[in-house]
Image: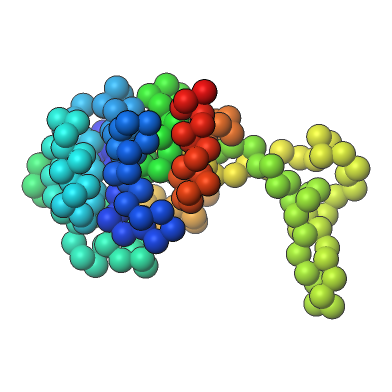
Amino acid sequence: MKPLVVIPARGGSKRLPGKNIKSLNGKPLIHYTIEAAREVFDDSIICVSTDAEEIKDVSEKTGLQVPFLRPKELATDTADSRSVLLHAYKYYKEEKAYEANTIILLQPTSPLRNATHIREALELYNDGLDMVVSVKETDANPYFVLYEENEEGFLEKSKKGNFTRKQDCPKVWELNGAIYVMNFETLKKRQPKDFEKVLRYEMCSENSLDVDTELDWKLLEGILND
């Protein structure tokens, strides 16, 4: 495996402004992910991909060098993760003569994902796969509590099944956004959502917490101060 670790941190955040560098329990949010990555990988293959000078400066306070500022076209609301990853790959190939074959995406909004989680996900990966992705068991099971409207406007279960207890339903997994270990050959050809050979790496609900709102932030503070 020749890994490239990408930590994407765009400057704009409408629901929770400045969240990537917002102080969580006395430490910028992005530092949690950088520190976890550095326990597993060498600094030379950890790439914080950001468009913001402030995020670059805060990230480099850990001692990690941020190699570039992301181009403007990759800093919009519509820029997708695949384009960001391909840009980072190209930079390392052309500027550092390092050609990765595996991309590890670690989002800074998952601060309770740690080095052990990363190592365990990596152990599941092989180059015959498209991806290993972190998940949690969903609370909103589509066989039991999720409904859709039919053509007549009436609610019907999203997944058909004759289950009277939630614990009897098939387990359903929700991507938690914490860890993506991707085969670069597959990433070159298609979006991660279209990958076919995908294995799950299961995490508990607490470690899966993803920061998107002020409520998420308060939950994180409560967990870290418990």
At x 18%, y 46%, the residue is: 56
x and y percent of residue 206 in the render?
A: 55, 31
Q: In which quarter of the image is the N terminus?
A: top left
x and y percent of residue 213 in the render?
A: 48, 51
Instruction: Give the answer, above or below, for where 15 lies relative to 115.
Output: below
On the picture, is 12 further left or further right than 204? Answer: left
At x 78%, y 69%, the residue is: 149
x and y percent of residue 73 in the render?
A: 24, 67
Q: Can residue 127 be seen in this view?
A: no
At x 27%, y 62%, the residue is: 75
Quarter of the image for residue 118 reads: top left
Q: How is the protein colored in the picture? A: rainbow
Picture mark count:
0
Quarter of the image for residue 92 reads: top left
Instruction: Give the answer, above or below, for where 114 lies relative to 50.
Output: above
On the picture, is 139 further left or further right than 159? Answer: left
x and y percent of residue 125 in the render?
A: 44, 31
- From the viewer's side, name the closer residue of 61 and 77: 61
At x 26%, y 62%, the residue is: 74
Q: Can residue 225 be seen in this view?
A: yes
